[in-house]
Image (cartoon, rainbow, N blue to C red):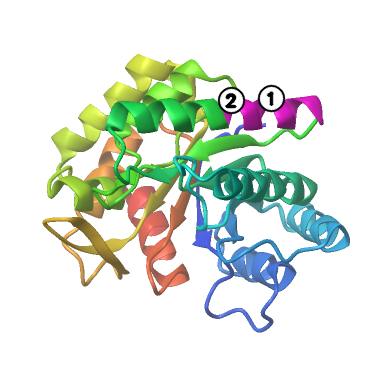
Amino acid sequence: MPPKKLLFGTAGIPESTKGNNSVSGIERVRELNLDCMELEFVQGIRMSEKGARNVMEAANKEKIVLSVHAPYYVNLNSSEEEKLNASKERIYQAARIGSLCGAESIVLHSAFYQKNSKQNTYCRVSKALQELVRQLRDEGISPVLRPETMGKRTQFGTLEEVLSLSSEIEGIMPCLDFSHMHARAGKENSYSEFMTILSKVEEILGKESLSNMHMHISGIEYDKNGEKKHMTLKESDFNYPEILRALKEFKTKGLLICESPNLEKDALVLKKNYIAR
């Protein structure tokens, strides 16, 4: 079920967690008065089915909403069949284990353009995602796949590409990383620009899509090629007060995941600023 409000949480277990596992992280998220957590499978999926069910039990008990970030080692534009199949398998396994955790969204980095044109890359990514969605549906695996807007210009994942995939393929929805969009373009950092982004989402995917969003925010360092690294909000020029203002104006609901290096500190900054508006 889509959240009834905008939820704030961390990309992975909070830094202040006493244990180093997802269950401990969920408990710490609740202690911090945050609302959600993205399970980070970015270095590989090392969670068993039993472990996943324990995670779901903890999340239900603490009333914490979960999502998953699939492994980084994915390129749905690979010309090598072995690498393409391995990429699809990583996304599939992230969705399978994520579903057992109770996660409803699987965030993924789709591809690199490499030597292909943007149009050819789009077609290859679209084909692979259609095959994945069909496989998940056939096996009764329910989470939505969410291609992320990416911060480097060599990466597939502009706002337009992600929204187009979401409009064309049932079972695909966007993950909007506002910091990535800012880093990629060197702009997209004002209230009017944030409003334009959200207006595009509403125009292409319908007003109901704004009630079930998955979003990333962090401080970010960038250059002419786009993203270099994540930073704390305080260190960065990312204009987080204005994106919060725009999200409130659109009455956006869903998950807002903080990816800053200080995770829960900036997640709490975001939540407190949003509530104070």
Name the residue located 55 percent from the left edge and 72 percent from the top edge: 14
Label 1 close to label 2 by CB (< 8 Å):
yes
Dot 2 crowding, Cα within 10 Å, few <14, some 14–19, many 20+: some
Q: Position of residue 91 (x, y in %)?
A: 62, 46
The reply to whether residue 160 is visible in this rendering is: no
Is 130 within the magenta?
Answer: yes
Judged from this view, the residue extending furthest toward the bottom is 18
Q: Main secondary structure of the magenta part?
A: helix
Q: State the residue in front, 232 or 129.
A: 129
Q: Amino acid at mark 2?
A: Gln
Number of dots carrying numbers: 2
User: In this picture, which residue range is highlighted in magenta?
Assistant: 129-139
For residue 81, above or below residue 46 = above
Dot 1 crowding, Cα within 10 Å, few <14, some 14–19, many 20+: some
Q: Position of residue 7 (x, y in %)?
A: 51, 47
Q: Determine which residue is flagged by label 1.
A: 134
Name the residue located 58 percent from the left edge and 57 percent from the top edge: 37
Q: Position of residue 226 (x, y in %)?
A: 20, 55
Q: Determine which residue is flagged by label 2.
A: 130
What secondary structure is marked by label 1? helix
